[in-house]
Amino acid sequence: MPGGLQVLNDQAVIQIDGTFQNLCLVAKGTISTTTGNQSPYPWARFARIDYPVAGRQPIIAFHTQGWACYLVDDSGFKVFGMPGSGASKDPLVVEYFIFDLPQYAQAFGDVGLQVWSEQGVEVFHSKNRYMRVVGAYSVNIAYDTTYTGSVPGGIKLAVALGVQSVGYLSERIGTNAQMGLAVRMWQGQCQTPAAGGSYLISNRLITAFAGPGLGSNQGSVGAYNNGLVLDVTGY
């Protein structure tokens, strides 16, 4: 940007100017999942988050002590997963944060620092809660189910899942030992960092189901599980 207001950090890198773009917190809450016996993953816990996804591009992030991922449709998110305790009747408690375009954020009024582009479009408002990315991860579940990273200590983290993996294992199943295909969905958990600021992304099996298949070798489809790690302190 050749002119106008510019906000720089201590390394003289521009943080905010007329080209600034970021998503804002538009919704948050806590859900407690029900027991299983819902399709397509009968062994998982489920909960529904209503949000007008159609025509928008929201990102949802989870803060939980269990393992969670989601399915999405035009009217919201279907969260499913397993509690950290692993007990069959325990609920999965998930704190969620939805980020979307600034025009869908809560109206805070005209008080505070505001930055407009040359076209008169508001690109920054100091009272918006923008998405703060502090890390990213990619795990190949065929070889490893965890990822360790580091962030400043004492902050609250949430995981915005990207690719959610599906694994498979061809094996002989059933009374006639026919070749079958066992499919495993994986879910992610991010443990809140300790005083040292390290965090652990871990994945575990949600459920497995079998059906007729071909082949005889173990393998995976979409083995990579990736996403963003967000700082949601104070959100």
Image: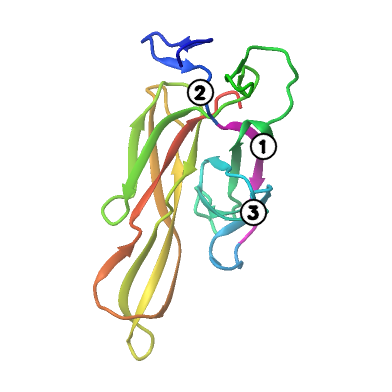
User: Would residue 26 be counted in the magenta stretch?
Assistant: yes
Q: Under tag 3, what secondary structure?
A: strand
Residue at image position (67%, 38%) is 29
Q: Amino acid at mark 1?
A: Ala
Q: CA distance from mark 1 to mark 3?
A: 16 Å
Q: Which mark is residue 19?
A: 2
Give the residue at x 60% y 63%.
36
Foreground mark, 1 or 3, reads 1
Predominant SS along the magenta part: strand
Q: Is residue 144 magenta?
A: no
Amino acid on which disc 2 is placed: Thr
In this rendering, the count of numbered labels is 3
SS at circle 1: strand
Q: CA distance from mark 1 to mark 2?
A: 25 Å
Examine the rendered structure and indicate whether residue 75 appears above or below residue 168.
above
Q: Nearer the viewer, residue 53 or 184?
A: 53
- Where residue 98 sits, quadrant-wise, is top right
**Display colour scheme:** rainbow
Residue occupying image coordinates x 54% and y 53%: 70
Q: Which residues are magenta?
A: 23-35
Classify residue 101 by image quadrant.
top right
Location of residue 184 in the rendering, given as x and y in whole percent from the top left corner:
41, 64
* Quadrant assignment, res 28: top right
Mark 2 against mark 3, which lies toward the viewer? 2
Residue underneath mark 3: 47
**Label 1 sits on residue:** 27
Measured from the top left, where is residue 92 in percent x and y? Answer: 58, 49
- Residues 65 and 22: in front is 22
Q: Amino acid at mark 3?
A: Ala
Q: Is disc 1 in contact with disc 3, using a CB cutoff of under 8 Å?
A: no
